């Protein structure tokens, strides 16, 4: 076993010398930082236990030496520039690699922000009318990427008022609304959504409104929420007050038998437990509902008081699943309706109902695009969202 010493200004240069002179099968016995650069000891030939014992630092013999062909990539072996000068062996560690990845990620993020800023500045100079429209949409709470898409077809030669009407018409056309589907036609209806968005209150409002119009014996409620303390009891108390049958099940697997028991009811509302968007059980539950013998229409419940990125996560979690539409709740608690409309436009989800307030059976309306846009413009006029450049620049992210 022949030992050879290499010296170079940095690790990359040293490894390249070794690779060129001794090939990829050379064994690296040690490496360390010395004055002026990096020193590497290599060995080639039959393994010699005595040499390995002599040159390999104690505590690292189980993982070194190793052939150069099996060594980590050169980038991972680079020496952190802030490391103090030392004659101790310099060994590449997982912590070093992780730290380098963090630093590279931070640099990437910084570059993306700078490039987005340059792109927004260049866009403002090239298309001042579209840039002005984008700022106004931002003040309404519209997501930057959607806003940029909406203004992209506006002719720069148009007057602002005419261009603004064009943008609103384009956006309104992309918000389909359903014509009071649950209260008009009944059926088996499931309400899904994240925890705390108002599913149980929405179910109570729909059930009470239907009972007033058709009779309490025509409607029933099923609670499947065994995770939230008192969820079953809340619906049972409501059912007793208005004379509506309320049943509880421990999971969606029990729904077929329960729905069969309620086959004489025109409207059966199923209150599903809330899930975090990242919870795989969320998708499994909705997939199970779509496969039940009795047809169940599922509506996604979204809180209008939630920010766009959180809403985006929810709609992404149900992407590809058979949803009949969505319902927007808590409009009275929202500072802006723009984020909710941005989410439903992006997800192409038709809106069935909107709620604002806790009064049962009041504070419930069938959704119309005119109603939604009237509320969005009213909120934007009284409580405009700050049109900060850093926020708008997200529309130009790579």
Image (cartoon, helix red, strand yellow):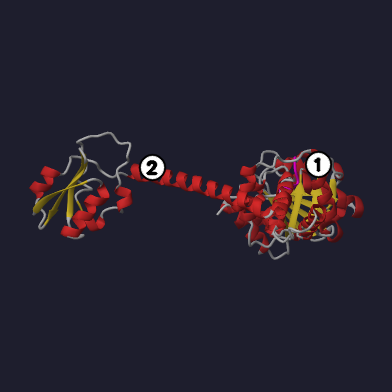
Q: Which residues are magenta?
A: 335-339
Reading the image, the residue beneath label 2 is: 99
Where residue 155 appears, as percent x and y from the top left, is: 74, 60
Which residue is drawn at the image coordinates 57% and 53% (left, top)?
Answer: 280
Reading the image, the residue beneath label 1 is: 381
State yes or no: residue 10 in magenta.
no
The quarter of the picture where residue 254 lies is bottom right
Which residue is drawn at the image coordinates 86% and 59% (left, top)?
Answer: 184
Residue 381 position (above or below residue 169) = above
Where residue 245 appears, as percent x and y from the top left, is: 81, 49
Q: What is the quadrant of the N terminus in the image? A: bottom left
- Distance from Cα at disc 2 to Cα at disc 1: 47 Å
In this rendering, position of residue 277 left or right of residue 71: right
Q: Main secondary structure of the magenta part?
A: loop
Where residue 132 appears, as percent x and y from the top left, is: 72, 49
Q: Earlier in the sequence, mark 2 or mark 1?
A: 2
* Mark 2 secondary-structure assignment: helix
* Mark 1 secondary-structure assignment: helix
In this rendering, position of residue 257 left or right of residue 72: right
Q: What is the quadrant of the C terminus in the image? A: bottom right
């Amino acid at each position: 076993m022949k030992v050879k010493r290499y010296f170079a200004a940095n690790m990359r240069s040293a490894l390249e010398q070794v690779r060129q002179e001794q090939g990829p099968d050379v064994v690296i016995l040690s490496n360390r930082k010395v004055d002026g650069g990096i020193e590497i000891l290599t060995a080639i030939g039959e393994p010699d236990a005595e040499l390995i014992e002599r040159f390999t630092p104690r505590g690292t013999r189980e993982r070194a030496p190793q052939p150069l062909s099996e060594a980590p990539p050169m980038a991972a072996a680079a020496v952190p520039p802030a490391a103090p000068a030392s004659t101790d062996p310099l060994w590449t560690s997982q912590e070093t690699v992780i730290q380098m990845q963090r630093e590279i990620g931070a640099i990437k993020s910084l570059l993306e922000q700078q490039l987005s800023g340059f792109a927004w500045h260049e866009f403002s100079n090239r298309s001042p009318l579209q840039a002005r429209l984008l700022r106004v949409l931002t003040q309404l709470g519209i997501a930057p990427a959607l806003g940029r898409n909406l203004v992209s077809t506006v002719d720069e030669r148009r007057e602002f008022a005419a261009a603004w009407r064009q943008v609103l018409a384009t956006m309104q056309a992309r918000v389909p609304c359903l014509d009071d589907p649950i209260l008009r036609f009944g059926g088996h209806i499931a309400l899904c959504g994240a925890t705390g968005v108002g599913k149980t209150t929405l179910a109570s409002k729909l059930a009470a409104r239907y009972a007033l119009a058709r009779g309490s014996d025509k409607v029933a409620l099923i609670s499947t929420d065994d995770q939230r303390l008192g969820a079953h009891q809340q619906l049972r108390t409501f059912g007793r007050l208005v004379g509506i049958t309320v049943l509880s099940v421990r999971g969606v697997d029990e729904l077929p038998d329960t729905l069969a028991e309620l086959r004489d009811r025109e409207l059966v509302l199923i209150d599903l437990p809330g899930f975090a968007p990242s919870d795989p059980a969320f998708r499994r539950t909705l997939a199970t509902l779509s496969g039940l013998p009795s047809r169940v229409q599922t509506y996604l419940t979204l809180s209008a008081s939630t920010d766009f990125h959180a809403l985006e996560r929810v709609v992404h979690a149900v992407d590809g699943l058979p949803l009949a539409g969505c319902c927007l709740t808590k409009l009275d608690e929202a500072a802006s309706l723009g984020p909710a409309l941005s989410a439903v436009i992006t997800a192409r989800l038709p809106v069935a109902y909107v709620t604002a307030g806790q009064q049962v059976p009041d504070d419930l309306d069938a959704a119309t695009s005119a109603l939604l846009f009237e509320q969005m413009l009213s909120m934007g006029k009284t409580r405009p969202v700050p049109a900060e450049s850093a926020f708008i620049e997200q529309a130009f992210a790579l």
